[in-house]
Image (tube, helix red, strand yellow):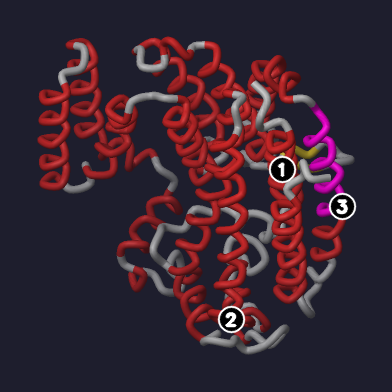
Amino acid sequence: MRHFDFTLILTTLALAVIGIIIVYSATYPSSQLQLYQKQSMFLVVGVIAMAAAMLIPLKIHYLLSYYYYGIACLVLFILLFQPGDVDRWLNLGFIKFQPSEIAKLALIFILARFAVDRKKDLNSVKFLAVCVALTVFPFILVVKQPDLGTGLVFVVITFFVLFVAGVKPLYLFIVASPILSLLFAFHWIAWAVYFGILVAVLLLSKPQIRVTVITTVINLLVGIFTPVIWNRLHEYQQERILVFLDPGRDPFGAGYQLIQSKIALGSGGLFGKGFLSGTQTKFAFLPAKATDFIFATLGEQFGLLGELLVLSLFLLLLYRITKITIECRNPFGKLVCTGVMAIIFTQTFVNVGVTAGIMPVTGLPLPFISYGGTSLVVFISMIGLALNIFYHRLEY
């Protein structure tokens, strides 16, 4: 029994139970009240999946990683051909699930295996190009659904895994440079300053000439074609970005969610209005109160103290996973645990940031707490993987 991290298990279950309580309070007394019952059932399924993840040897995941990735991408591709508008869920009749959640795990496994297999070539152009390709393919498929938030999680996973694998920060910066160029190119002065910094870094660090040329050309092209990329975004995605910069731009439209979220958080005060007593939640002013904005539901009813309790549980969870990552001697296990930590950290940070109005609305659920069967089962399965790695952390 001493080989089990009971702190990690209990923290996970505490977050999941808190999630069920908040889902209940968010839907009471509406017709959606049965959602908390479904979430409870998903928790039971998640615990079974966690037990399975604890028992399956990591070597099996290593051997099947390419199959995981191929199947995940195939299912994401099939989603594009569903009748009607592109949907994020695959409906098989007897079950409906969100393939992009499973694809996150598949990406972790294949990047971890590829990095372990190519540990002598981590800083080569070919290795980085393949890693970028492995990330870009599911990224495009998910963005087409459309689900830009989940697509960005794929990007974060890649950078965390490659950094821990041993890729030099300079090469990670070069890989990230087109993304940074895209962000800065919305204003020509900001982009000019960024491009000057990029050129200076390349000249001072002196990477291979072809790397310097390719990086410079790609960033130039991204800067030039940013208006085209902006026009290719869905209208609601454009509005989310503009409303983030100016919440009062459309207070009854795209900015409504953000404004109501801030009201719910602020009105909760230090101790909150009490369980089932939130006006923004009870009278349906707050949209997506059981999913994307569930943290605002929590804050309105339980106040700042409730928010700090939940955030403390997340910090404890991330601390335990990070500790397992550091202690793990198996390279594949270390990178898998890194990917798990990256997903939980990113989605927690983004979801809470969106709720507080410091980040654009992305639609990412709060791990373990937001309503969603696929999300809850996958996240608890990730904890099972971390527990598996903890058990074998001293083995090579």
Name the residue: 76% across, 52% down: 6
Is residue 49 within the magenta segment? yes
Name the residue: 71% across, 55% down: 7
Q: Secondary structure at mark 2?
A: helix
Q: Secondary structure at mark 1?
A: helix
For marks 1 and 3, the one nearer the N-term is 3
For the residue pair 362 and 91, the one nearer the viewer reads as 362
Q: CA distance from mark 3 to mark 2?
A: 28 Å
* Left or right of 200 on screen, residue 1: right
Tell me which secondary structure the magenta stretch mostly adopts: helix
Q: Amino acid at mark 1?
A: Val
| Residue 305 x %, y % | 57, 79
Q: Amino acid at mark 2?
A: Glu
Look at mark 1 in the image and give the residue it sits on.
378
| Residue 353 x %, y % | 45, 62
Look at mark 2 in the image and give the residue it sits on.
300
